[in-house]
Amino acid sequence: PPPPPPPPPPRLFFFQAEDGIRYRSPCRGIGDVYKRQVEMGGLAESQLARAVVALSRRDLGLAEQVVQTDSRIDDLELEIHEFTLRMLATRQPMAVDLRIILAALKISSGLERIGDYAKNIAKRTTTVAEITGVEGMAQSITRMSTIAQRMIKNALDAYITRDLKMVADVCVRDQEIDLMHTNLSRELLTFMTCLLYTSPSPRDGLLYRMPS
């Protein structure tokens, strides 16, 4: 008998990434993964910005909004996980498509964690609102947040557009944030050490100004 005919080539689906380039993929829905990641990244960036604003301004209303909005990030992470796992099971992606799907799983988990951090910052607003003399700490956190927001945006843009220069910039910014975190930790340690000798109680010590 004649040999069986070869299987038909996979149907190619087109999607357009953020850089305006149209990509071909045998897996329907790759473009939807990108869209969900972009939405999730933008929301995580916004949540971080609003949480720090609420902390610096002691805005309890804004802090509560940040806490409530966190559920949307959780929903997006669940959607991405379900979508990508379904694609792995039904489409059997290979090469670039497989790497995109695996990256989507890890990226969504990282963005969800950023959302959780933003929610935790917002929750701390209630405590900070009752304390005086911590303006220096809030200003340092605000500066760190500005850099972190830029890192989130650039990291996602680099992933979508395959921009290696932007990847290098994110790495440089990470070192800058590490240094700021180290300096802030030392400042807070010095501040708390001073309280042991100048405050009648830990709670009363919170009313002293932080050293500039």
Image (cartoon, rainbow, N blue to C red):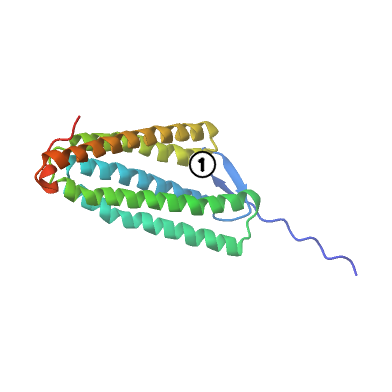
Q: Is residue 172 above or below residue 15?
A: above
Looking at the image, which is closer to me, 28 or 129? 129
In what quadrant of the picture does the C terminus appear?
A: top left
Q: Estimate the x, y position of residue 126 in percent, counting from the top left.
A: 17, 50
In this rendering, does residue 32 appear at all? no
Q: Estimate the x, y position of residue 122 in percent, counting from the top left.
A: 25, 49
> Which residue is tagged 1?
159
Q: Residue 174 lies in what quarter of the image?
A: top left
Q: Is residue 22 above or below residue 136?
A: below
156 sits to left or right of 47 = right
Looking at the image, which is closer to me, 104 or 120? 120
198 sits to left or right of 73 = left
Looking at the image, which is closer to me, 161 or 182? 182
Residue shown at 79% from the left, 60% from the top: 6
Q: Residue furthest bottom?
A: 1
Q: Residue furthest right?
A: 1
Number of on-image labels: 1
Q: Estimate the x, y position of residue 57 in percent, counting from the top left.
A: 18, 40
Residue shown at 44% from the left, 59% from the top: 79
In this rendering, does residue 165 appear at all? yes
What SS does tag 1 mark? helix
Q: Is residue 113 above or below residue 19?
A: below
Residue type, label 1: Tyr
Q: Residues within 10 Å of mark 1 (few under 14, many from 20)?
A: some
Residue shown at 50% from the left, 32% from the top: 168
Residue shown at 87% from the left, 65% from the top: 3
